[in-house]
Amino acid sequence: MKKRYIVLENGSVYEGESFGSDANVMAELVFNTGMSGYQESITDLSYRGEMIVFTYPLIGNYGINRDDFESLRPAASAIVVHEIARRPSNWRQMMSLEEWAERMNMPGITGIDTRALTRELRDNGVMKAALVNEVTDDIFSEIKKFVPSKKMVADATTKTQYQNPTDGVSIALIDFGLKNSILRSLAKRGVNVMVFPADVDAETILAANPDGILLSNGPGNPQDVAYAIPTIQTLQEQLPLMGICLGHQLFAIANGAETYKLKFGHRGFNHAVRNLSKERLDFTSQNHGYAVNRDSLSKTELVVTHEEINDHTVEGIRLKNHHAFSVQFHPDAAPGPHDAEYLFDDFLNMIENAKKETTQNA
Ligand SMILES: NC(=O)CC[C@H](N)C(=O)O
């Protein structure tokens, strides 16, 4: 195997061995604490522009299967592992992670002390980094100069509108880089899903006559998706609305709140979240580097509904006097626990109640 290096913007260099593509890449280096679920994470479009360090020491031990894709190609820029499994074994396995990385041209590095690397990221915060074949003299200045794309959502979203038609309730899903498991969660509930590109306007959505609006997860900084804000503002006045992850952050911004970048984010699936109204704790699947600023909520009509139990960051909000709420975590799970899936049912109930109110007031 060929030697490869991870070079961090703070000057640290880690040596390992290449798998998959040996192209040089620059991205933000983040860590994921899931003990499994690498296939879902690597293909989750929210990871665009990010290189994932897996803290679990053996990655790839059950290979790649047909069912767990969150999108059909790798979304992460590269992956960093302590040890890539050489002999994966699982009844669902189609091929090894290594083989898939090669086919998909995804760069990877193995043989890294991921514990030391993660500690660096925890102490310093997430950093820009390069995965390279050679540590050149000018690599550090190149990393410093590297600016992550502000068009990640535009690159991840669907280019055309499409539908998963059923006779059920109709939900317009705005795709900021959606995970397949959101579609799976809606399909399981018989929802007629209409998926729209991220830059859709409110008129186009309203013309399709949906019963509710769902804002998906997605990559990058929510402040780079300012073009979606007027659409959200118009739609929340007319229809029940739910937001997930990036969709949650955009819903917050649309209502006057602010977002900020977390030091090292939440990426894993053992993040316990308290539902403040039900006094209920759920283990949740998370993948976010930004969060809603709690202090900024005081000047809005938003209330906090969920918080992370360790760092108390805002994990859910709702809009007073409206059928509209959002969560920072993934009720669709994948990877991770299904504790929070009830939120899709809450949303469908909300849509039912809103319909009843409209009929009563008519
Ligand atoms: N999973 C997501 O939707 C992530 C939202 C946003 N890109 C963040 O990192 O905070």
Image (cartoon, rainbow, N blue to C red):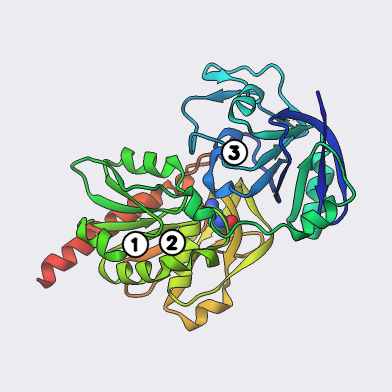
- Residue at (42% x, 46% y) in the render: 341
Above or below 239: residue 126: above
Instruction: Classify residue 313 as left or right of residue 243.
Output: right
Name the secondary structure under disc 3.
Answer: helix
Q: State which tag comes first along the sequence, 2 or 3.
A: 3
Mark 3 Cβ and ligand 1 under 8 Å apart: no
Q: Residues within 10 Å of mark 2 (few under 14, many from 20)?
A: many
| Residue 308: percent from left, percent from top | 59, 60
Q: Which mark is residue 326?
A: 2
Name the secondary structure under disc 1.
Answer: strand
- Real-space Cα distance between discs 1 and 2? 8 Å
Ligand 1 location (quadrant): bottom right
- Residue at (87% x, 45% y) in the render: 136
The quadrant of the rendering that contains the C terminus is: bottom left
| Residue 169: percent from left, percent from top | 22, 49
Q: Which residue is mark 1?
A: 241
Name the secondary structure under disc 2.
Answer: strand
Q: In the rendered structure, which amino acid carries the disc numbered 2?
A: Ser
Above or below 278: residue 102: above
73, 284: nearer the viewer: 73
Q: Which residue is mark 3?
A: 42
46, 62: nearer the viewer: 46
Q: Residues within 10 Å of mark 1 (few under 14, many from 20)?
A: many
Q: Residues within 10 Å of mark 3 (few under 14, many from 20)?
A: many
Mark 2 and mark 1 in contact (Cβ < 8 Å)?
yes
Instruction: Classify residue 178 as left or right of residue 144.
Output: left
| Residue 297: percent from left, percent from top | 51, 77
Q: In the rendered structure, which amino acid carries the disc numbered 3?
A: Ile
Q: State which tag comes first along the sequence, 1 or 2.
A: 1
